[in-house]
Amino acid sequence: MIRDVVFAGVRVQARASGALYWPQCDTLIVADLHLGKSARMAARGGALLPPHETTDTLARLEAELHALNPARVISLGDAFEDALAPEALRAEETARLAAMAQGRDWLWITGNHDAAALPGFGTVADEITEQGVTLRHIAGAGPDISGHYHPKARLAGQARPAFLIGAEHLVLPAFGTYTGGLDCGVEPLASLVGPGLALLTGARLLACPLTRPTGRKDRRQRV
């Protein structure tokens, strides 16, 4: 399921998977894959996560590429859990990534987790601007499309990863499996996006209006 969105004068498509497609640029945009999260957390002595999270994230990304066959992919930062994660990926995982990149441009925007980490292909940039819209990891001067916060929205008591669409900022949900999330009604997301629209991902996209910020704070989430 997709939903057409006009943001800052450009038309993009929010997809139920959490990916964003920009038809005019034939570009698939994803944020916060956090590949290698379970392995790197275990290596650091952190919480043990199910070990298949990278495989699941790659499978969902492959499905989007198969459906759209875009000429370009842009990852909006934190594609990897940390700067060592690309080297820690299993050989078959690296091969799957390389196969996805074959025949298309791949741009890795740097994030606060992965810096300039690369799996051996593609190019790296801090941010890029196209048609007056900046694509970066953390929202700054708008209009921009970003990630970083792993936004979630709640509807009928259920929280789901969500696109947040305001006047100046379009924030993507985390595409990676087991990435956690931050409630869109708490700071800093509430003030950053302001009144607008949340599109909850899942089997189908569900729209929920975003009202004026309440000023609630949530210190539990670390991104």
Image (cartoon, grey):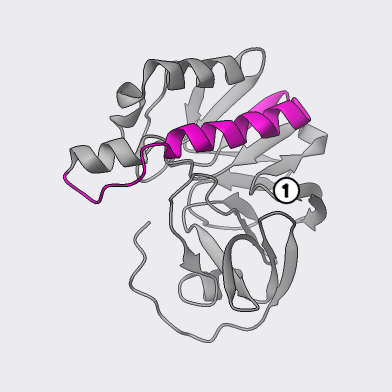
Tell me: 139 left or right of 115: right
Q: Position of residue 197 (x, y in %)?
A: 71, 69
> What residue is drawn where x is 54% and y is 69%?
192
Which quadrant, please, contains the C terminus? bottom left
Residue 173, placed above or below residue 127: below
Mark 1 secondary-structure assignment: strand
- From the viewer's perspective, is 45 left or right of 163? left
Q: Residue furthest left?
A: 45
In this view, which residue lies farthest toward the bottom?
214
Residue 23 visible in image = yes
Above or below for 69 versus 211: above
Residue under the image location 27 percent in, 37 percent down: 40
Q: Quadrant of residue 82?
A: top left
- Against 26, residue 186 (above or below) is below
Left or right of residue 25: residue 84: left
**Residue for point 33% across, 70% down:** 220
Residue situated in front as seen by the camera: 173 or 134: 173
Identify which amino acid the numbered label 1 is placed on.
Arg
**Residue 83, image x, y percentages:** 31, 33
Q: Dot 1: few (<14), some (14–19), or many (≥20) neighbours within 10 Å?
A: many
Q: Quadrant of residue 157?
A: bottom right
Q: Is residue 209 magenta?
A: no
Of residues 106 and 44, the one drawn nearer to the viewer in this rendering: 44
Location of residue 14 in the rendering, given as x and y in whole percent from the top left corner: 73, 50
Question: In this figure, what is the number of numbered marks?
Answer: 1
Label 1 sits on residue: 15
Q: Please check the rendered image and state whether residue 46 is part of the magenta-colored stretch, yes or no.
A: yes
Q: Is residue 79 in view?
A: no
Residue at 74%, 59% (x, y): give it. 205
Magenta residues (range): 45-74
